C-alpha cells in the first residue's frame, strides 16, 4: 500500500482517528511514521540510489579505462 491516509493524531494521549468512518472496523497493529520523517527518508534513499548509479559507472570497465586515461593525460 503506497497511498497515505490522513488521520487525526492526539499529541496528548496518542489516539489516532480518521475524520470520517471508512467502513467496518477491524483492529490491527500498525507501525506509523510522521509524513515529514517518511519524506526525509525517501530523499535519503533517492540520493543513495544516485550515488550507487555513479559508482556503478565509475567501477565499470569503461569507467576505469576512462579514469586511467584522464590520469595519464593530466600528467
Image (spheres, helix red, strand yellow):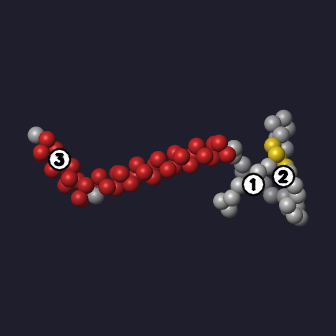
Image position of 47 (left or right of 7): left
The percent position of residue 39, horizontal first and vertical second, equals 60, 46
> For residue 37, what is the image quadrant?
top right
> How far apart in space, not on screen, are marks 3 and 1 (Cα)?
52 Å
**Residue 59 tag number:** none
The percent position of residue 23, horizontal first and vertical second, equals 87, 64
Q: Earlier in the sequence, mark 3 or mark 2?
A: 2
**Which is more toward the observer, 29 or 4?**
4
| Circle 2 residues within 10 Å: few <14, some 14–19, many ≥20 | few
Q: Residue at 65%, 42% (x, y): give it.
A: 36
> How far apart in space, not on screen, are marks 1 and 2 (Cα)?
8 Å
Secondary structure beneath dot 1 equals loop
Secondary structure beneath dot 3 equals helix
Mark 1–mark 2 CB contact (< 8 Å): yes
Mark 3–mark 1 CB contact (< 8 Å): no
Q: Residue at 67%, 46% (x, y): give it.
A: 35
**Residue 5 tag number:** 1
Q: Is residue 32 above or below residue 24?
A: above
Image position of 47 (left or right of 32): left
The percent position of residue 57, horizontal first and vertical second, equals 31, 55
* Residue identified by numbered label 2: 18
> How far apart in space, not on screen, are marks 3 and 2 (Cα)?
60 Å
| Circle 1 residues within 10 Å: few <14, some 14–19, many ≥20 | few
Q: Residue at 80%, 58% (x, y): give it.
A: 28
Secondary structure beneath dot 2 equals loop
Q: Quadrant of the N terminus?
A: bottom right
**Residue 70 tag number:** 3
Amino acid at each position: 500500500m503506497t497511498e497515505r491516509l490522513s488521520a487525526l493524531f492526539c499529541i496528548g494521549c496518542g489516539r489516532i482517528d480518521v475524520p470520517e468512518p471508512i467502513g467496518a472496523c477491524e483492529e490491527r497493529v500498525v507501525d506509523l511514521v510522521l509524513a515529514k520523517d517518511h519524506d526525509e527518508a525517501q530523499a535519503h534513499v533517492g540520493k543513495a540510489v544516485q550515488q550507487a548509479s555513479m559508482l556503478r559507472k565509475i567501477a565499470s570497465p569503461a569507467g576505469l579505462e576512462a579514469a586511467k586515461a584522464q590520469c595519464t593525460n593530466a600528467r
